[in-house]
Image (cartoon, rainbow, N blue to C red):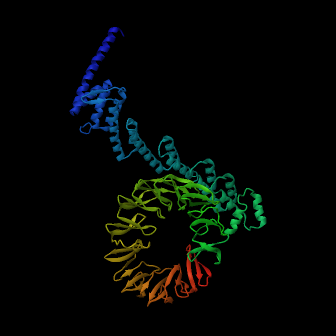
């Protein structure tokens, strides 16, 4: 290009810029007086010059909501372009508007905040991705919130999909996400479930070899060991011991192999076992323990102190302890002089240590408290782990506290949930509530964490249901966090396995977990009555003017009519009160046993206790008198009664005297009665 042409070009460019720069003051002056139409038109004409000030002006117009051009996405686009086109340190001012990187950055942040607020009202992954792509100039804390929300939505999606490849993709593509740790637990669980779907021994062996660092490794050890135990599989027990010497079940596997291999305990057989397995780690102590395990001992109380008796009722360990538990894994927890410790069946102290608290052993581990610190100890009394606090095992899960936060471990001491919660309740039926910052969520034994979004959660029932409080109203959820019953009720009380008492506006009804109401919420509620007054699990009491009872199908109906009281049917009979006397009716309200008793109990195991003319009677379902006494008769266990006469008699349900001169009856574990006679003899009665 020659000199004249070059001069002409720069002259033309200079004239154009002069025209352009002259339009900017007019545009900002129009913007100042809210003449958005003129300002927009002038700013748009400046775009062809890549002018950042024009983009700032357009961003302001689209950002403001007092004009028809309000559009936040366009506002963010022009604001970002303006920032990128503006030289660092450059500042221009028009009609009071200062345009520099600071003002553009501040405007970008304001626009981004408004866009994010709308997205947050109805979160969507695609919208968040678009936001993160376009709003990169926003405040870092806002971007972090957007990243976290996007990750949460994607994580919830992979939880629903529940496939390991999707979870692995999330971990790879979101390495900085705060959910990576949870996703890693999820990934490990999914791998475990996918690779052991057939629950076969070979699958568990293969999984353990392929995934030595998987968080589900203890579950695999446990499943494999339990299969070997269930099948008495000596071959695979040997393989388990050889291949997994670091497994939590290693010692238990040795014990099981010993018990499956040694039957008669003669010297020849024992020597043969030790010759075949020279690495057997319990050559002396385990043999002695197994011998002691043949002895059954039961805690026995006398004058507020405890000892232990054998199956013949003979005192084997002297009465000297303030508290005493049953023997578990060969040891019992006792206390004496405010010290807690473990003893074996020879009444020897198992370890050198004393504790403030101690619990029974499970899987060779026990939680204790020593010097104010929670410890998990092994069967040799050695400390395995230390915590600020550790609770007694519940549903095969320990709850522990470290650094002021609560976490959970499985029955073998493997971390299931890192300490990160303000509180965790005891696991029951596979789940437990947790709380963080006053909100409640729940955890499952499979390692899942469900969002804290409730004001309160009850324990989970045997059917996997829990009562929740949300918006100061109550509902029911399952272990997948799905609503079984919406949060619309003033109170909900569990009556039985599947039936719940539902209260609203002082009316009540009954809800079944299959999703239907057995009785609508329109019956008269009495707050002073417990849940068992309204239902015994088989029958429902309905009160509205009159009182009636129906079964779960609503087919059988029993009306109170002129009765003063009416109990639920038991053994086919209904205890009722009429004219201040008790009797029994059949389900058709025919009198089965006359109204003549001063007091009466429900029938249990076809027997009831009644009083007649200041005497106590045992009667059967036909009203036949089985036993009579001037002294009180007390129910002790199924089919067993104690008459508190001078010679203290223990009766069966036929009214037959089993023991006389009874001084004391202890119910051990609902399967055994320990009976002390006046002469000091101890008798054992096994319950069916």
Is the residue 18 above or below the residue 681 in the image?
above
Q: Position of residue 260 (x, y in %)?
A: 70, 63
Quadrant for the N terminus in the image: top left
Q: Is residue 672 left or right of residue 559?
A: right
Q: Is residue 305 above or below residue 629?
A: above
Residue furthest right in the image: 268
Query: What residue is shown at x 32% (from left), y 38% (from top)?
Result: 110
**Quarter occupied by residue 367:** bottom right
Vertical position of residue 400 compared to residue 61: above or below? below
**Seen from this angle, which residue lies furthest top?**
3
Looking at the image, can residue 519 be seen? Answer: no
Name the foreground residue: 291 vs 222: 291
Left or right placement of residue 55 versus residue 325 in this view: left
In the rendering, at what x and y percent does residue 178 appear? 47, 45
Give the image quarter of residue 200.
bottom right
Q: Could you tell me residue 417's position as x and y percent?
A: 51, 53
User: How many marks can you see?
Assistant: 0
Residue beneath the point at 33% across and 10% down: 5
User: In the rendering, at what x and y percent does residue 28 appear?
Assistant: 24, 29
Which of these two is toward me, 291 or 686? 291
Q: Residue at horizontal 39%, vertical 45%?
A: 124
């Amino acid at each position: 290009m020659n000199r004249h042409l070059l001069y002409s070009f720069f002259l033309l460019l200079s004239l154009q810029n002069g025209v352009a720069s002259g339009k900017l003051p007019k545009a900002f002056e129009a913007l100042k007086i809210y003449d958005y139409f003129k300002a927009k038109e002038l700013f748009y004409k400046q775009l062809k010059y890549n002018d950042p000030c024009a983009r700032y002006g357009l961003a302001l117009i689209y950002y403001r909501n007092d004009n028809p051009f309000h559009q936040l996405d366009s506002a963010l686009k022009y604001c970002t372009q303006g920032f990128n086109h503006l030289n660092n340190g450059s500042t221009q001012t028009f009609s009071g508007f200062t345009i520099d990187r600071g003002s553009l950055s501040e405007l970008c942040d304001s626009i981004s905040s408004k866009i994010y607020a709308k997205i947050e009202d109805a979160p969507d992954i695609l919208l968040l991705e678009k936001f993160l792509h376009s709003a990169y100039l926003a405040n870092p804390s806002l971007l972090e919130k957007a990243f976290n929300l996007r990750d949460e939505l994607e994580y919830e999606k992979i939880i629903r999909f529940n496939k390991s490849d999707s979870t692995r993709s999330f971990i790879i593509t979101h390495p900085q996400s705060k959910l990576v740790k949870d996703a890693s637990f999820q990934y490990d669980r999914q791998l475990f479930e996918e690779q052991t779907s057939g629950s076969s021994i070979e699958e568990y062996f293969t999984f353990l070899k392929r995934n030595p660092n998987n968080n589900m490794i203890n579950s695999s050890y446990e499943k494999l060991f339990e299969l070997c135990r269930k099948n008495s599989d000596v071959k695979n027990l040997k393989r388990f011991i050889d291949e997994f010497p670091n497994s939590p079940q290693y010692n238990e596997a040795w014990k099981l192999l010993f018990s499956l291999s040694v039957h008669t305990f003669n010297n020849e057989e024992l020597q043969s076992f030790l010759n075949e397995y020279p690495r057997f780690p319990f050559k002396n102590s385990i043999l002695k323990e197994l011998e002691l395990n043949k002895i059954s001992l039961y805690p026995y109380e006398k004058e507020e102190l405890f000892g232990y008796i054998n199956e013949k009722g003979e005192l084997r360990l002297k009465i000297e302890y303030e508290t005493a538990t049953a023997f578990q894994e060969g040891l019992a927890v006792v206390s004496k002089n405010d010290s807690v410790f473990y003893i074996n069946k020879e009444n020897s102290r198992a370890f050198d240590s004393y504790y403030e608290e101690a619990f029974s052993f499970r899987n060779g581990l026990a939680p204790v408290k020593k010097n104010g610190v929670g410890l998990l100890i092994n069967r040799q009394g050695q400390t395995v782990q230390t915590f600020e606090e550790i609770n007694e095992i519940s549903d095969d899960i320990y709850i522990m506290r470290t650094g002021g936060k609560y976490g959970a471990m499985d029955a073998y001491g493997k971390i299931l949930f890192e300490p990160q919660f303000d509180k965790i309740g005891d696991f029951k039926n596979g789940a437990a509530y947790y709380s963080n910052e006053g909100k409640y969520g729940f955890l499952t034994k499979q390692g899942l964490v469900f969002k804290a979004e409730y004001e309160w959660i009850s324990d989970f029932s045997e059917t996997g249901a829990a009562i929740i409080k949300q918006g100061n109203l109550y509902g029911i959820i399952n272990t997948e966090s799905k609503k079984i019953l919406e949060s619309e009720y003033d109170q909900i009380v569990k009556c039985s396995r599947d039936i719940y008492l539902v209260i609203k506006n002082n009316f009540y009804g009954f809800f079944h977990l299959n999703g239907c109401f057995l009785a609508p919420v329109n019956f008269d509620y009495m707050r002073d009555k417990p849940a068992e007054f309204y239902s015994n699990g088989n029958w429902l009491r309905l009160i509205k003017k009159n009182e009636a009872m129906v079964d779960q199908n609503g087919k059988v109906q029993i009306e109170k009519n002129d009765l003063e009281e009416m109990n639920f049917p038991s053994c086919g009979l209904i205890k009722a009160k009429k004219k201040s006397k008790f009797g029994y009716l059949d389900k058709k309200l025919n009198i089965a046993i006359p109204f003549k008793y001063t007091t009466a109990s429900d029938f249990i195991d076809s027997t009831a206790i009644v009083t007649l003319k200041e005497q106590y009677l045992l009667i059967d379902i036909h009203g036949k008198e089985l036993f009579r006494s001037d002294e009180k008769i007390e129910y002790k266990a199924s089919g067993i009664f104690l008459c508190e006469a001078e010679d203290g008699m223990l009766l069966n349900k036929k009214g037959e005297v089993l023991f006389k001169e009874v001084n004391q009856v202890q119910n051990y574990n609902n399967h055994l009665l320990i009976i002390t006679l006046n002469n000091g003899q101890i008798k054992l009665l096994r319950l069916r």
